[in-house]
Amino acid sequence: MKVTFLYKNLSKSQEKDFVDYVNQKLPTIKNLLSKFAADACLLNASIEKFEKHDAFQVEFNLSLPTKTLKATEASHHITKAVDLSKDRLVTQIKKHLDLLRNDRSHKTIRKSQSIKSEVQSEIPQV
C-alpha cells in the first residue's frame, strides 16, 4: 500500500507528529487489505489546521481496485482526529470486504450458464 501525505496550515513539528502517528496506525489498515495486491491500494492522508477554531481536520482517502473509501474527522488534537478517522475507515473497509465476500452474483451467472449448456446438450438435435 502506498501512502501519501498532504498538509495545510501546519508547522513542521505538527507535520512530523502527524506522519509519525499515522505510520503507527497503518498496520491495522494493512492487515485488513492483505487480500489486495500491495501496489493496488493507495492511501491519501491529509490534514488541515483551522486557526479560527484551533482544530484539525484529518481525511483518509483509500483507493482500492473495487472502490474508493473516504473517512473524515475533526478534533482539537491531531491524535484524536487521526484515531477517529482511522476507526471510520476501518469500519468501511470491513463492510466492503464483507460485501465482497458475500457477493455471489458472479457465481450465479456462471451456474446459470452451465445449466443452460447442460439443458441444450440434452435436447435432441433435429
Image: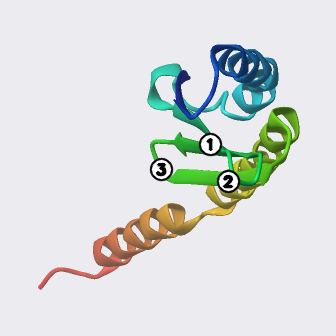
* Mark 1 or mark 3, earlier in chain: 1
Of discs 1 and 3, which sits in the foreground? 1
Tell me whether circle 1 and circle 3 mark residues in contact (CB < 8 Å).
no
Tell me whether circle 1 and circle 2 mark residues in contact (CB < 8 Å).
yes
Q: Quadrant of the C terminus?
A: bottom left
Q: From mark 1 to mark 3, how far is it between C-alphas?
A: 17 Å
Task: Pick whichever, 12 or 117, lies toward us.
Answer: 12
Task: Pick whichever, 5 or 27, lies toward us.
Answer: 5
> What's the residue type where badge 1 is placed?
Phe
Residue to which mark 2 is pinned: 72
**Up-down relation of residue 120 to residue 51 (above or below):** below
Count residues near mark 2 (Cα–Cα under 10 Å), then give few for <14, some for 14-19, many for 20+.
some
Task: Pick whichever, 68 or 36, lies toward us.
Answer: 68
Q: Position of residue 52 (x, y in %)?
A: 69, 53
> What's the residue type where badge 2 is placed?
Thr
Residue to which mark 3 is pinned: 66
SS for tag 1?
A: strand
- Residue at 50% from the left image edge and 42% from the top image edge: 64
Residue to which mark 1 is pinned: 60
Q: Quadrant of the N terminus?
A: top right
* Mark 2 or mark 3, earlier in chain: 3
Q: From mark 2 to mark 3, how far is it between C-alphas?
A: 20 Å
SS for tag 3?
A: loop
- Residue at 63% from the left image edge and 46% from the top image edge: 59
Q: Position of residue 91 (x, y in %)?
A: 79, 53
Task: Pick whichever, 47 or 63, lies toward us.
Answer: 47
Please name the colour scheme applied to the rendered image: rainbow
Please tell me how many numbered marks the rendered image carries. 3
